[in-house]
Amino acid sequence: MKRIQINALVATLALLVLGQPVWGQVNDQVYLKSSPNEAVRGLVDAVSSKEVVIRVNGTPRQLAANTIFRIQFANAPADLLQAAAAYRRGQFNEAKTGLAGINVNDIKDKWVKEEIAFMLASIDAKNALAGEGDKNAAGTLLIGFINDNPDSFHHYESVELFADLAFSVGQFQTAADYYKRMVESPWEEMKLYGTLRMANAKVGLESFADALTQFEQVANYSATTPEQQAIVAEAQAGRARCLGETGKAAEGIAIVEKIIADNDEKTQKKLFAQAYNALGVCYRKNNQDKDAILAFLHTSQIYNQDPDTHAEALYHLTQLWEAQSRADNAAAVKSLLREKYAGTFWENKLRNQ
């Protein structure tokens, strides 16, 4: 039965029982990122990776997929609505438990099934990125969702998550390929961020000249929003790192010093972690090991909230402490890296040396 027929039937029955209009109860509800507490109500007619079309009072309205915060479909079961609320609160295990109680075979609405599949895949991916799950298994589930649901409005969000998983385990070429899909999206800010992340993947591949070109492309962007400014600042940190890797350490150090001076360490901890890691790389390339230790200690001790940058700092500190004949320090850092980030690129790199 078509979605419009189901909605009409539910509305008719409700009117007969209650004797009053209840159209709001059977509408689909689309919430936008710009106003996440206010719904656009109507009937969703079409969904693709790029836009959602919702009919409001008989008039089709096209909404770009990247502007959508969430969709609450009228045919969604109560268990899904509760799980979705837990998901938005970041209570992923609670959400997953709620989803487990839904019999998907009873769901007739294709888009509701997609919501369930997306949430299950993204929960595992986000848990794994936080160090609380199997990244390879999460990646397998997520790529299954991407391939099975190419027209989902969650498509680009899923692509980014999968690329992040690939990046975190050192599959940098795969990560670059999926970040490239973001670059090929219709939206300027996503193109910009995709280029930044693709450049980071090129660093992982040790293609520093290519990465530098991409970082400079982003760094030269005329940012007009706080989100764009954050992307540009991260590109500057990447640029500094690549300059250090390509024999221009002094220039890279100067860029990092400007990043530190121009930004707020309280609200941009990930940027500062990237900046101090870039600084540490530049100092290492310039044979200034003691200065490099201080730089990586900033990330390890202060700006350690981001797993990738923290793991990288620990990796470098292990090597630097060993070079300084500080075996106890090296052993403590190595133990932390293995305990906290087992299976990551940096832990694997250390283990294979």
Image: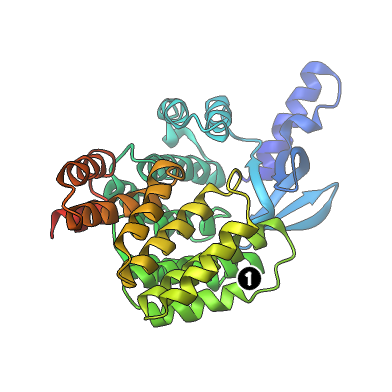
Q: Is residue 346 left or right of residue 310?
A: left
In the image, residue 287 above or below residue 217: above
Q: Residues within 10 Å of mark 1 (few under 14, many from 20)?
A: few
Please report the residue visible at 64 percent of the width from the left and 59 percent of the height from the top: 262
Q: Give amino acid for label 1.
A: Pro
Please report the residue visible at 59 percent of the width from the left and 73 percent of the height from the top: 219
Residue 200 location, x and y as percent? Answer: 42, 67
Question: Residue 102, located in which quarter of the rendered image?
Answer: top left
Q: Is residue 297 left or right of residue 20?
A: left
Instruction: Please state, as top left, top right, bottom left or bottom right, where the N terminus lies in the image.
Output: top right
Query: Would you say residue 65 is visible in this rendering?
Result: no
Residue 19 location, x and y as percent? Answer: 85, 19
Q: Is residue 205 left or right of residue 71?
A: left
Toward the viewer: 229 or 280?
280
Q: Residue under circle 1?
A: 186
Toward the viewer: 267 or 324?
324
Query: Would you say residue 131 is visible in this rendering?
Result: yes
Please report the residue visible at 44 percent of the width from the left and 35 percent of the height from the top: 104
Question: Residue 267, located in which quarter of the rendered image?
Answer: top right
Residue 260 location, x and y as percent? Answer: 57, 57
Q: Secondary structure at mark 1?
A: loop
Question: Residue 39, located in which quarter of the rendered image?
Answer: top right
Instruction: Please state, as top left, top right, bottom left or bottom right, where the C terminus lies in the image.
Output: bottom left
In the image, residue 26 above or below residue 190: above
Residue 220 location, x and y as percent? Answer: 63, 76
Please report the residue visible at 36 percent of the width from the left and 75 percent of the height from the top: 245
Total numbered labels: 1
Q: How is the image coloured?
A: rainbow
